[in-house]
Image: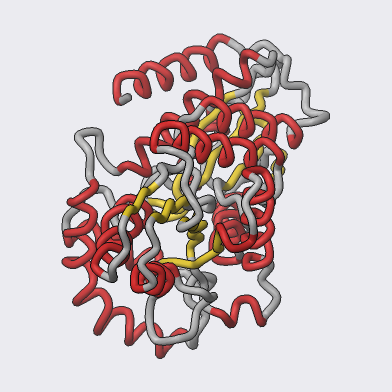
Amino acid sequence: MPRFLPEPAYRHGSPPQTAVLLINLGTPEAPTAAAVRRYLKEFLSDPRVVEIPRALWWLILNAIILSVRPRRSAEKYAAIWTADGSPLKVHVERQAKLLRGFLGQAGHRVLVDYAMRYGEPSIAATLSRLKAAGCTRILLLPLYPQYAASTTATALDAACVWLQSVRNQPEIRSVRSFADHPGYIAALAASVRQHWASSGRPGDSYRLIMSFHGLPRYTLEKGDPYHCECQKSGRLLAEALGLRAEQYQVCFQSRFGRAEWLRPYTASTLKALGKQGLQRVDIICPGFPADCLETLEEIAIEGRAEFIEAGGKEYHYLPCLNERDDWLHALADIATSHLQGWPTQTVPDQASLEIAALRAKALGASS
């Protein structure tokens, strides 16, 4: 027999609540080797993330990777850590707070929270907290514009595991992807135009690099649509900016291990462009709605060094969408389209209001 989590006290006549749960990948709790080791162990133990035989991978992970990589990664995290903590966690926390306000302005009385697939706050703990607040309808919104089994699917896996432990399950919906959502593309384009307005419109010796997180090539061969959705996002962004084919390039970063990954690789592309003596590179990471280690350290710092050392001239990293108003409007539109049919105008009961007020106060103090 399954063992269920304790149920919150049932309050007869309480109006049902609706919630939106933003989900991102996760982050270590601190820029230390011990914290990074815990995070990497959870992340790299996920069979959707690394699809090789478990016994072999267990040996590689525990005997090699977790012995060497945490210290190196901790140094990189330390380089981008802020006074408020991990940049990714700070941005996602603020996005959740602001999204609730944007939805409220549109007349939707919903709770909005966030969770991390790996690390804290966990998906299970956050879903339990929303259920305790009276939520009977929860929209899962993974913050991955392009669908991949190793990102979106594993986040939904974690939610389903939690559902198995719940006696009185809430109604669940999920957002699959938003790679071609007009508001998302428009926000990306506006961020590039804003950069051009401050740094000057580039001349002919120019390339806009759109760097997406990489995946092993076998994921494409096995039917993962991620590569295609990245290409579509890149094409739509280029069209919105009026770029010619030779003025932009879709690339893939964060390659790990010896296996072939999706090409072209961002690092190799930057080195090649530098050797060609390209005057200017602007680089944006459309697959990351919030700045994190992979954007702030790998692209903004390492990418710049690779391009300049190879002979490149001018390098600009464009920040992620983070808390831009146009992005939050798009996110609210994405959420609203998936909330259709749920009565989000219900007035919350006093207990839920108090919980939401405490949550908002805590978020305000940390921002």
Q: Viewer-proximal residue, 137 or 106?
A: 106
The residue located at (69%, 58%) in the rendering is: 232
Question: Quadrant location of residue 346?
Answer: top right
Question: Quadrant location of residue 10?
Answer: top right
Q: Viewer-proximal residue, 251 or 351?
A: 251
Question: Taking 220 as reference, is 216 left or right?
Answer: left
Question: Quadrant location of residue 347?
Answer: top right
Q: Is residue 140 positioned above or below 49 on the image? A: above
Where residue 164 appears, as percent x and y from the top left, is 62, 54
Q: Is residue 293 positioned above or below 198 on the image? A: below
The residue located at (47%, 46%) in the rendering is: 202
Q: Is residue 55 positioned above or below 124 on the image? A: below
- Work out which residue is located at the far front of the displayed protein and give it: 204
Q: Is residue 179 positioned above or below 140 on the image? A: below
The residue located at (72%, 21%) in the rendering is: 344
Question: Taking 181 as reference, is 358 left or right?
Answer: left
Q: Quadrant of the C terminus?
A: top left
The number of numbered badges drawn on the structure is 0
Is residue 1 at least partly visible in the picture? no
Is residue 178 at least partly visible in the picture? yes
* Colour setting: secondary structure
Where residue 166 appears, as percent x and y from the top left, is 60, 46
Where residue 268 appears, as percent x and y from the top left, is 40, 74
Question: Taking 8 as reference, is 339 left or right?
Answer: right
- Work out which residue is located at the far right of the displayed protein and give it: 341
Q: Quadrant of the N terminus?
A: bottom right
Q: Viewer-proximal residue, 197 or 37?
A: 197
Where residue 63 appears, as percent x and y from the top left, is 25, 84
Q: Viewer-proximal residue, 347 or 231?
A: 231
The residue located at (48%, 40%) in the rendering is: 201
